[in-house]
Amino acid sequence: MSAVGNDWPARIETVLERALQLPEAGSARLREAMRYSVLGGGKRLRPTLVYATGMALGAPPGSLDDPAAAVELIHVYSLVHDDLPAMDDDDLRRGRPSCHRAFDEATAILAGDALQALAFELLARTPDDGADALRRLTMSRLLAQGIGTLGMAGGQAIDLESVGHHLDLHALQTMHRLKTGALIETSVLMGAAAAGELEGPVCAALREYGAAIGLAFQIQDDILDVTGTTASIGKVAGADAAHAKPTYTSLMGLEGARAAAAVQHARARSAIASLGRSGAELARIADFVVGRSS
């Protein structure tokens, strides 16, 4: 991911690899499916946001490893389930066969379930002290809220219910805010929680930033589904139109969607202007979200 500075890309891969060093008891096939899904590449946007936010607020990198791994495991679990025939029925993910194609549907369901469980196991590690225990509890709550009925799962339900139907702009924004934006905003807030910063004007600014880039990310996804190729985006291009899914491009046209993404990009940058130089990496991530081609 070009927006990332420092050694975060290598660190993210290391913490994910470490998290997936699972006990050999049980199903080797399940463990293989989990590793296949997580370690097969990706932008790693969500763990990057955990590190960028936490370190902007002074959190030591070691305190961010577990929440960074947890949000990526949750994200991958959502992709594995999203690709299933009962959901989006996608055969390609990150440039290679989706988990249910590489293994089978039942294994993919279980792999997603196990990745979700592993994410919360990481956050529930034995805390260093009372303050760390409170931070871990807070991050667990934030993550649960971000993927529940008022988060990712709720957005996916609206997405499935809306196939073949027209959504107005408000309804489309609500779906995107929940399905995609909620976990991105949660990633920002988990970085803030790791730094002990979940109240006051700084937290409010970060919430605004997270909400803005979460929506911008999904709008850019809608754009790339129209303008990208299967090779460039790592999944089947044109799938949204083929499945009659409401998107920003279907509602507003390509140029209208680009304008909407630009509005959210400006909103994100404005939200963190008060952070000054400490928010520079977050600003670069906002640039990446709307400038990416995959």
Image (cartoon, helix red, strand yellow):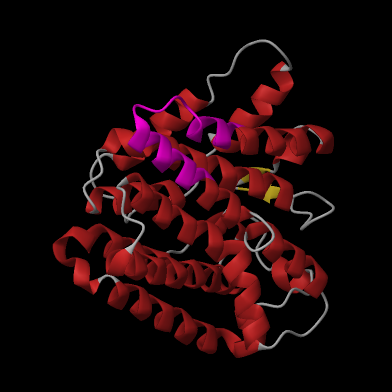
Q: Say if the magenta span includes residue 192.
A: no
* Magenta region, main secondary structure: helix
The residue located at (45%, 24%) in the rendering is: 126
Front residue of 141/154: it is 141
Residue 10 seen from this side: no
Q: Position of residue 210 (x, y in %)?
A: 42, 65
172 sits left or right of 281 in the view: right
In the image shown, does 165 or 224 lie closer to the viewer?
165
- Picture quarter containing residue 223? bottom right
Give the residue at the far front of this rendering.
130
Q: Is residue 119 magenta?
A: yes
Q: Nearer the viewer, residue 281 or 229?
A: 281
Q: Which region is colored magenta? A: 118-140
Q: Position of residue 44 (x, y in %)?
A: 45, 47
The residue depicted at 47 percent of the width and 46 percent of the height is 139
Query: Which of the 4 quarters of the picture holds residue 274?
Result: bottom left
Q: Is residue 249 above or below residue 215?
A: below
Q: Residue at x 35, y 45 (%)?
A: 194
Q: Position of residue 96 (x, y in %)?
A: 63, 43
Left or right: residue 284 versus residue 185 is: left
